[in-house]
């Protein structure tokens, strides 16, 4: 079978195609013909060597495809079923309070989905939303589930709440879609007026160009009559966190899920505790969270926004397109 391998020390020119024999499923395992994957910042970090992995690691944390064969004892799936991956195969339910649950990550600590076939434990997969294509399903396990957990699990948003989303990447677009499905008002930020127009078309109630309005925290408070927002899906990290703290309402919730502007920096702690606000780190979610999300997607008719698809052997070009930040929504691999 065709597969992509990361050759150390990483770098997009060190993503090379090779052949790997698909393994027969053992007890508790299934073999899946993978048809699609989607790009996340985590995958990019692996590809360029920012997150070092074993030499010849098969990258990509997200995958969707069709079950080809099942091993002894597998009853949840049968050949022909459409399935999608889970970011943490060992995190079935409950809190993320056991480090063992968060150690096996496809495309990182174990081989991932940049391959035509994978053989993994059945617990590493869930069903896909009814009617979804493979590409649509492949956008969900990392980006969509991160947004879902931020809104529905940790912040427990409700109708009438105000949510701020940053940018137009996968997590932010899913957060907008889930927030609108919950009956929330959404404020979206971007440096591109073209992308802000697209965010409004998706349902954003107000938008802010942060290049034109660098003090967007104050502008957010203006838009909310001085109150601030109930939840911020914070993808920027250290560079945007001070503005997020300025924008958050009293007793509001900041879901910290990204580090696009840096891994560390100054935090205005006095402003944070004066607002009695919460900053909650989010690392994707559990199988139970994913199944709840699938039910919500089906109930609300949510459809992922896919910008562009590349073939498996075009993975380096796909990451270069991701680097350019021209995309809106998700970038997929289809094979």
Image (tube, grey):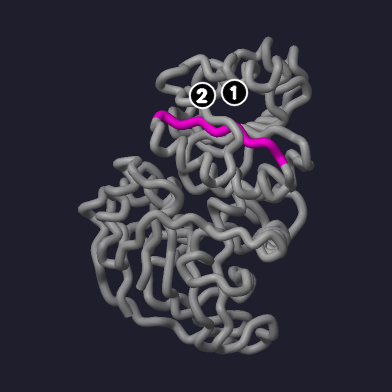
For the residue carrying disc 2, how many other residues have a C-alpha within 10 Å: few (<14), some (14-19), or many (20+)?
A: many
Q: Secondary structure at mark 2?
A: loop
Q: Which residue is mark 1?
A: 244
State the residue at coordinates (73%, 19%).
227
User: Is 269 in the magenta?
Assistant: no
In this view of the protein, can residue 60 be seen by the observer? yes
In this view, 270 is above or below 182: above
Spatial distance from mark 2 to mark 1, Cα to Cα? 6 Å
Q: Are marks 2 and 1 in contact (CB under 8 Å)?
A: yes
Q: Is residue 182 above or below residue 196?
A: below
Callout 1: few (<14), some (14-19), or many (20+) C-alpha neighbours within 10 Å?
A: many
Part of the protein shown in magenta: 184-191
- Tell me the quadrant of the picture where the N terminus can be found: bottom left
Q: Which residue is mark 2?
A: 240
Q: Can the viewer see residue 52?
A: no
Q: Along the line of sight, which residue is nearer the eye, 54 or 44?
A: 44
Specify whether residue 186 is painted magenta. yes
Q: Is residue 156 above or below residue 307?
A: above
């Amino acid at each position: 079978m065709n597969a992509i391998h990361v050759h150390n020390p990483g770098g997009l020119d060190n993503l090379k195609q090779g052949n790997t024999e698909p393994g027969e499923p053992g007890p508790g395992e299934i073999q899946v013909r993978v048809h699609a994957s989607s790009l996340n910042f985590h995958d990019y970090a692996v590809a360029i060597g920012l997150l070092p992995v074993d030499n010849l690691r098969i990258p990509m944390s997200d995958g969707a495809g069709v079950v080809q064969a099942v091993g002894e004892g597998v009853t949840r799936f049968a050949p022909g079923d459409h399935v999608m991956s889970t970011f943490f195969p060992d995190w079935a339910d409950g809190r993320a309070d056991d480090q063992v649950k968060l150690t096996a990550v496809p495309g990182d600590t174990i081989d991932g989905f940049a391959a035509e076939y994978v053989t993994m434990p059945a617990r590493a997969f869930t069903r896909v939303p009814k009617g979804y294509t493979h590409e649509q399903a492949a956008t969900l396990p990392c980006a969509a589930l991160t947004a879902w957990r931020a809104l529905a699990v940790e912040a427990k948003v409700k109708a009438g709440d105000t949510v701020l989303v940053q940018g137009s990447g996968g997590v932010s677009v899913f957060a907008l879609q889930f927030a609108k499905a919950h009956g929330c008002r959404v404020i979206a930020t971007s440096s591109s007026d073209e992308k802000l127009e697209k965010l409004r078309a998706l349902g954003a109630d107000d938008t802010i160009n942060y290049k034109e309005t660098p003090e967007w925290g104050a502008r957010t408070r203006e838009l909310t009559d001085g109150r601030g927002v109930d939840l911020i899906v914070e993808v920027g990290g250290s560079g945007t966190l001070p503005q997020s703290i300025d924008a958050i309402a009293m007793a509001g919730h900041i879901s910290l899920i990204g580090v696009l502007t840096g891994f560390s920096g100054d935090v205005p702690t006095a402003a944070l505790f004066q607002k009695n606000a919460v900053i909650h780190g989010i690392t994707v979610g559990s199988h139970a969270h994913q199944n709840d999300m699938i039910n919500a997607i089906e109930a609300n008719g949510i459809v992922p926004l896919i910008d562009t698809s590349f073939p498996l052997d075009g993975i380096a070009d796909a990451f270069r397109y991701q680097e350019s930040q021209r995309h809106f929504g998700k970038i997929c691999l289809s094979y």
